Amino acid sequence: MTKRRLTLQRIMICVSAFFFLASVVSADTLTLGAGAGYKRMLEGVLKGYEQKTGQKVDQLYGHMGQIVMQAKASGSIGIIVGELLFLKSSGLEFADFKELGQGLLVLAYGKNVKLESVEDLNKPEIQKIAIPDAKQAIYGKAAFEFLQNSGLYEKIQNKIVTVATVPQVSSYLMSKDAEAGFINITDAIYIKDEIGGWMEVDKTRYSPIHLVIGVLKGFENKPEITQFLDFMSTDHETKEILKKAGIK
């Protein structure tokens, strides 16, 4: 083999190695954003996804206003898990929505507190009722809708403490900084051993909460997105996790 041919061969090997490494480095990682109230549920789903597919998922949680702002600023979030109407009105452009199920609002209460009905929020021993921010959290909006439509708002408005997210309401209940609070059924299920209990409220008194996976425009054809959506629609364990988390 001539020296010239050997040099060319080495160059070709180096070029091939470069493109191989470049393809590995540039392999896209899926970035998912979601409301903080679904963090526990999604962490379980994504742990299974990473174990079964070997694909990593970067996760961002917060109130939905934060997630939307980060999606707009970074351009790196490919999918957002949230409520359908909120996402449609967020100012973000979505290519598609995949339904996960319907979320439910519940009234939860701390240990050493006993509520038989929502009317018990009028009791004098109920001093603080925590609710997520209605402008940033869909369950805060649902809670205020429920209270107004049920005629309870004016009776208890002086007891209401507004916080940013569903998990913050849960923290208030667990730390006894509030006797009662409105959260989603998913968070209530996960913290059931750390609170006194919870009850579903009349879902005809607040707008339906349709939980979806929103695919941001420009990401719909990326292989990591299609792989994730296929997994969510076919994986049996994922469906069981959603069911146990109260997503119907």
Image: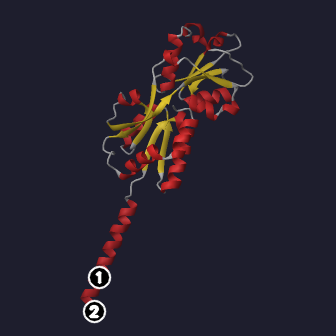
Q: Which of the image's four quarters has the N terminus?
A: bottom left
Q: Name the residue nearer the viewer: 238 or 89.
A: 238
- Secondary structure under badge 1? helix
Residue at mark 1? 9
Residue 222, how many percent across, how many down? 34, 50
Give the mark nearest the N terminus, 1 or 2: 2
Residue at the outermost right position: 112
- Decide if residue 66 is on the left or right side of residue 147: left
| Amino acid type assigned to the residue bearing label 1 in the image | Gln
Residue at figure coordinates x 49%, y 47% from the top left? 235
Q: Residue at x 45, y 23 (%)?
A: 208
Q: Position of residue 200 (x, y in %)?
A: 59, 22
Instruction: Name the amino acid type tagged 2.
Output: Met
Q: Is residue 195 left or right of residue 239?
A: right
Q: Which residue is identified by label 2?
A: 1
Quarter of the rendering containing residue 121: top right
Up/down of 88 relative to 125, above or below = below
Q: Which of the two residues, 88 or 211, is positioned nearer the viewer here?
A: 211
Q: Are marks 1 and 2 in contact (CB under 8 Å)?
A: yes
Against 122, is 107 above or below? below
Q: Which residue lies at the image location 55% right of the left edge and 7% below the top edge?
A: 154
Q: How busy is the neighbourhood of tag 2: few (under 14 within 10 Å), some, or many (20 plus)?
A: few
Q: Position of residue 233 (x, y in %)?
A: 44, 43
x%, y% of residue 159? 61, 14
Q: CA distance from mark 1 to mark 2?
A: 10 Å
- In the rendered image, the residue lying farthest to the bottom is 1
Instruction: Judge from the rendering whether residue 34 lies leftward or rightward of residue 161; answer left or right.
Output: left
Q: Eyeballing the image, is 190 above or below 183?
A: below
